[in-house]
Amino acid sequence: MISAENRNLDARRASSLRASRKLAVFIFIGGFIASLGGLMLRAPDSSGSAMAGTATTGTATAVPPAFTSLFGQEVRLDGEGLYRRDSVSFAAQERAQDLVTLIFALPLIAAGFLFARRGSFGGRLLFSGGLGYFLYCYGMMSIGTTYNEFFLLYVALFAAALYGFILSVYAIDADELALSCGERYPRRSAILNWLGRIVLPSLLTGRPPEGIDGGSTLFVQAFDLGILVPAAALSAFWLFRRDRRGYIAGSVLLVKGAAEGLAVAAMGFNMLRVGVAESLPLILCFLALAICALVIGTKAVLSAGFRTTQPG
């Protein structure tokens, strides 16, 4: 017999899921606009004045402007589109992120949205993982992208993803999820994947001060070392102990990690394309980790199942 307390808890979870799905509608629309705008928008005519002084007299070719950073380095600006005020390196990364958002992250959150509505644990894990991607992506862009016309949109997407993510995770019953996954959950693979994601960035992506490029601090490393690395370590520990919380944390981080890993690999390839120095072996390592996270995350979500239960 279900107690009144359990019924109230189920009702709160269902209410949280409904609220997170409402926020997801805005995230989907806003994310589509932000990512498509980043790829397609061209700089307004007025921004061309920044390059006017560097143009060669009598020619239509202008050299992108440059400035000296706080650390005394010459930083060349991209000079085109929405990211015209960002460095060539940052703009290449942002456009690659936009591309992955369009072709992978938006379909991911749409699938999670639909399956979560049907009450399946697999759908809720997809949904939370997708929201985790948008939380990380637009948190980064809110503080790391040089101010542009979409700044308020980035902040709104960051805020919506933050609260949507919290509400969506609260809507997952950890006990029922652990029972649903059982021995089918790829526990050992998830532990090894997360240990790899901790060790590889720590050993291979450390940057000297020039890695700051046109910024003032290493904000990406701050996010990763302050949030993702502890979360990954805790997830691996919980899974090793067969703690029910590990099934939620591990699955959500794997889904988010697969999407963001593909974005990081795309950033590296785009940086190579535009002539910004980057290590091809390192890019391939991140691509391999992203593929591993995608495979293991798929197994984790499938282990939870897509059986329809009570709609949220």
Image (cartoon, grey):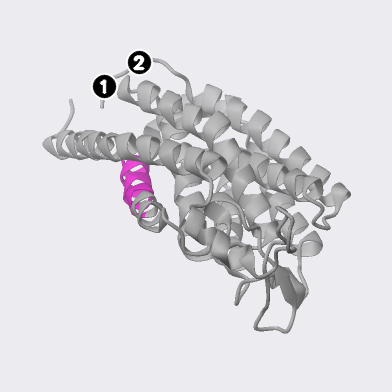
What amino acid is labelled 1 in the image?
Answer: Pro
Height in image: 43 above or below 117? below
**Toward the viewer: 246 or 40?**
40
- Residue 77 in percent (x, y) is at 66, 63
Picture residue at 48% right of the left edge, 32% below the top = 106
| Residue beneath the point at 56% across and 41% down | 39
Mark 2 highlights which residue?
Answer: 308
* Residue at point 45%, 50% (across, down): 135
Indicate the quadrant containing the N terminus: top left, top right, bottom left or bottom right.
top left
Is residue 116 left or right of 204 when viewed as pictured? Answer: left
Q: Is residue 302 visible?
A: yes
Please tell me whether residue 165 belongs to the stretch shown in magenta: yes
What is the chief secondary structure element of the magenta stretch?
helix
Return the x and y of residue 49 as percentages of the image width and height. 55, 64
Q: CA distance from mark 2 to mark 1?
A: 8 Å
Reading the image, the residue beneath label 1 is 311
Helix, strand or loop at label 1? It is loop
| The magenta segment | 159-172
Of the residues shown, which amino acid type is indicated by label 2? Thr
Report the residue that reaches farthest toward the front. Answer: 58
Figure check: 151 above or below 259: below
